[in-house]
């Protein structure tokens, strides 16, 4: 059986921790930041953990499972 190719767009957007959790950075931090509250900007800059429902799909795109 051949290897699964890594989806390059997914590999740039998601990182997998050593325990198998998938993290990503939220969108909306490029421009028009003066319209956002400081709290929204602060929370958007922190990495988030992906839902368990989506983790299986993303791990397949990354070629992990």
Image (cartoon, helix red, strand yellow):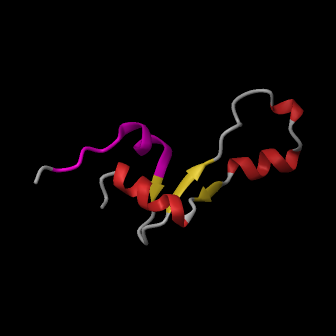
User: Residue sitting at 74 percent across and 27 percent down?
Assistant: 31
Q: Is residue 50 magenta?
A: no
Residue 19 vertical placement versus 56 (above, below): below
In the foreground, 3 or 53:
53
Does the magenta portion include 13? yes
The residue shown at (31%, 59%) is: 64
Q: Residue at the spot x=65%, y=46% of the render?
A: 26
User: Residue at point 30% right, 44% down?
Assistant: 6
Query: In the rendered view, would you say 26 is above or below 64?
Result: above
Instruction: Tell me which corner region of the image, top left, top right, bottom left or bottom right, holds residue 18.
Output: bottom left
Which quadrant, please, contains the C terminus? Answer: bottom left
Over which residues does the magenta segment extend? 3-14
Q: Position of residue 40 (x, y in %)?
A: 82, 47
How far across and down, in percent of the image, does residue 2 sit?
12, 49
Above or below for 27 versus 16: above
In-image side of 23 versus 17 (left or right):
right
Q: Quadrant of residue 11?
A: top left
């Amino acid at each position: 059986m051949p290897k699964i190719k890594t989806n390059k767009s997914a590999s740039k957007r998601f990182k997998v921790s050593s325990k198998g959790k998938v993290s990503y950075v939220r969108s909306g931090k490029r421009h028009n930041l003066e319209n956002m509250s400081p709290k929204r900007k602060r929370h958007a800059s922190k990495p988030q953990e992906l839902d368990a429902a989506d983790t299986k799909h993303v791990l397949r795109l990354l070629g992990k499972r």
